[in-house]
Structure formats: C-alpha cells, structure tokens
Amino acid sequence: MTLIGNKVVSAFQQAPAVVRFNGDGSDTTFALGRTISSVQDILVSVDGVVQDTSAYTVPDGSTLTFTAAPSSGTNNIFVYFLESTRGSITPAEENKGNFKHGGMFRTNAQSLTSNITILATENAQVTGPLTVASGVTLTIESGGRLVTS
C-alpha cells in the first residue's frame, strides 16, 4: 500500500508550533521557548518575508539571534517550528499488565483485595485460582461475564 503525505510514526506527535515576537528595531535576541537542534528546524519570517538562515543563528538551541535587529512591529516576527515534538502516554499502573520473560508470560494476582464490579457491558477473565478476601465484594452485573481458567 502506498502512503502519501507524512510518514507513519509509532509515537504520538504534537503538531509543529508557532511563536511570534514584537520587533523593536534594536533587540536581536528572542527566547524560542523550546530547544531545537539546528536552524533547519525552524522557518523565520520578519514582516512577512521568509528569512534565509544566514540572517539568524540559534547558538544555544533556544535563543533566536538575528545578525541585524528586525524592524519594529507587533507580532512581526514569526517562527514556525518544522520539527514535530514527540510525546508519550503512560498508562495507569493497573492498566499496564504484568509480564515476564520479554512478554512471554502474563501474570496476575490470585487474591482480590478490594471491591470491584464487572459492568453489564464488560467481559473479564482471571487466569488461575481466584480468592476473594474477607469483607471484599465481587459484583457481576446482569449481562456482564467473568471467566476463570
């Protein structure tokens, strides 16, 4: 199957960001608010004119430094971040599962120690013997299903 457009990635990505600055005719440095690895990671425009990378540097990765001060104006300096940022989502501990030997074996507890309800719209499975601790309630609503093996 042929893909057109952006390549498929296996991590969550945030769309490129845009920041704007006000030029005052004298300041040459502007804090980007994030770190980039090279000037190729941004597109810079002043007064609607895209700037060549020879017009600025980013010496520390986070400070845009122009070779000459941009003109005065409100939001007349536009920086578009071309590199997508990657993020991750960490599931809650109870949703991670317990695996051993590189995922070959999944393990689960043998004793239920807190109240739980299997909803009418849910199916649940427990592997191995299950002991419900004293004073703990396991409720399976009508339509719900619990399978033990």
Image (cartoon, rainbow, N blue to C red):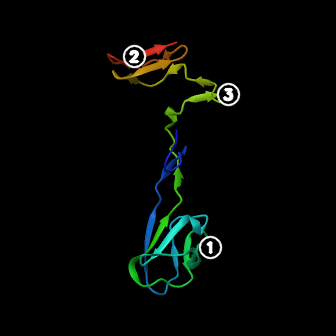
Q: Amino acid at mark 1?
A: Pro
Circles 3 and 1 in contact, beta carbons < 8 Å: no
Compared across the picture, whether 131 is left or right of 100 comes to left
In this rendering, the count of numbered labels is: 3
Q: Which residue is mark 2?
A: 145
Q: Which residue, as the protein is rendered here, is positioned at the far bottom? A: 26
Q: Position of residue 61 (x, y in %)?
A: 60, 68
Asked if 67 appears above or below 102 in the picture, the reply is below
Q: Which mark is residue 59?
A: 1
Q: Which residue, as the protein is rendered here, is positioned at the far front? A: 2
Q: Amino acid at mark 3?
A: His
Q: Nearer the viewer, mark 2 or mark 1?
A: 1
Label 1 neighbour load within 10 Å: few <14, some 14-19, many 20+: few
Q: Nearer the viewer, residue 103 or 15?
A: 15
Q: Tell me the distance, in whole angstroms, between the alpha carbons under discs 2 and 1.
A: 61 Å
Q: Which residue is mark 3?
A: 101
Residue at horizontal 54%, vertical 46%? 9
Q: Nearer the viewer, residue 134 or 40?
A: 40
Residue at horizontal 41%, vertical 24%? 115
Q: Which mark is residue 141?
A: none
Asked if 7 appears above or below 146 in the picture, the reply is below
Circles 2 and 1 in contact, beta carbons < 8 Å: no
Residue at horizontal 42%, vertical 76%? 48
Q: Which residue, as the protein is rendered here, is positioned at the far left? A: 142
Q: Tell me the distance, in whole angstroms, between the alpha carbons under discs 3 and 1.
A: 46 Å
Residue at horizontal 52%, vertical 82%? 28
Q: Nearer the viewer, residue 94 or 56?
A: 56
